[in-house]
Image (cartoon, helix red, strand yellow):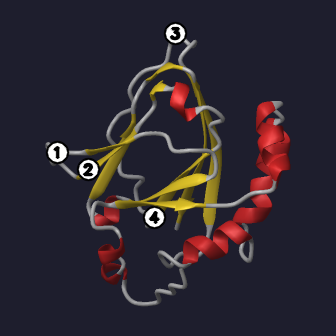
Amino acid sequence: MERRYKEPMSEVLPLFPKGFLLQRIEFEPSLKNLVSEEKWTEVDQHFLKLTAPGGAIFNLMQEFHPFSKIETMLSIRDGANEWEEDGIWHDDGSRVFAFSLSLTLNPGELEGGSLELRRKNDEQSEMIPTPEFGTAILFLTGIHGFEHRTRQVKKGRRVILVGWCS
């Protein structure tokens, strides 16, 4: 899928008719092993390279929306934690674009943990279940009129690399 967008941001909106799209990303099998073994520092280091300018994820995301840098964070939510709860609606401020890359090993065993997306102040929303390992949810942020939240994980473990492009 060869797409390069250098037009104004409003030209990007047709790519995201519901505010999001799914994109599969292939990784070497060793990454799944690092996640399985909970070697979070190594997982984080792996993605620092891929999301740096010139890295594979940085280049891929540029095909969908123009930006200059990516900030990331590993998010691990587990239904066994008594403090797990629904997230609050937010729009990621001035960031132009975001993604939620699933590193979840068994998404079929999850209960909850969906990403919920809507136009700001709209009653209707899209509920996007945690996808398979290596699938990213690419979604628009507040400057495009969207907001999102992550629903409570009630059962299982949800591991996500969250990325914000600005």
- Give the mark nearest the N terminus, 3 or 2: 3
Amino acid under disc 4 = Phe
> Residue 157: x, y in percent?
60, 26
- Give the mark nearest the N terminus, 4 or 3: 3
> Residue 40: x, y in percent?
79, 37
The crowding category of the residue bearing disc 4, from other C-alpha atoms within 10 Å (few below 14, some 14 to 19, many at least 20), is many
State how far apart marks 4 and 3 are (Cα).
31 Å
Q: Nearer the viewer, mark 3 or mark 1?
A: 1
Q: Nearer the viewer, residue 159 or 144?
A: 159
Q: Is residue 98 left or right of residue 88?
A: right
- Give the mark nearest the N terminus, 3 or 1: 3
Res 78 label: none
- Give the mark nearest the N terminus, 2 or 1: 2
CB contact under 8 Å: marks 3 and 2: no
State how far apart marks 4 and 2 are (Cα).
14 Å
Furthest toward the bottom, the residue is 7
Amino acid under disc 2 = Arg
Residue at the image position 54 percent from the left and 65 percent from the top: 165
Residue at the image position 48 percent from the left and 19 percent from the top: 84
> Residue 152: x, y in percent?
42, 25
Q: On the image, numbered disc 3 is attached to which residue?
A: 82
State how far apart marks 4 and 1 are (Cα).
21 Å
CB contact under 8 Å: marks 2 and 1: yes
Which picture quadrant has residue 156?
top right
Q: On the image, numbered disc 1 is attached to which residue?
A: 124
When the figure is inspected, residue 80 is found, relative to residue 156, above or below; the finding is above
Q: Nearer the viewer, residue 109 or 113?
A: 109
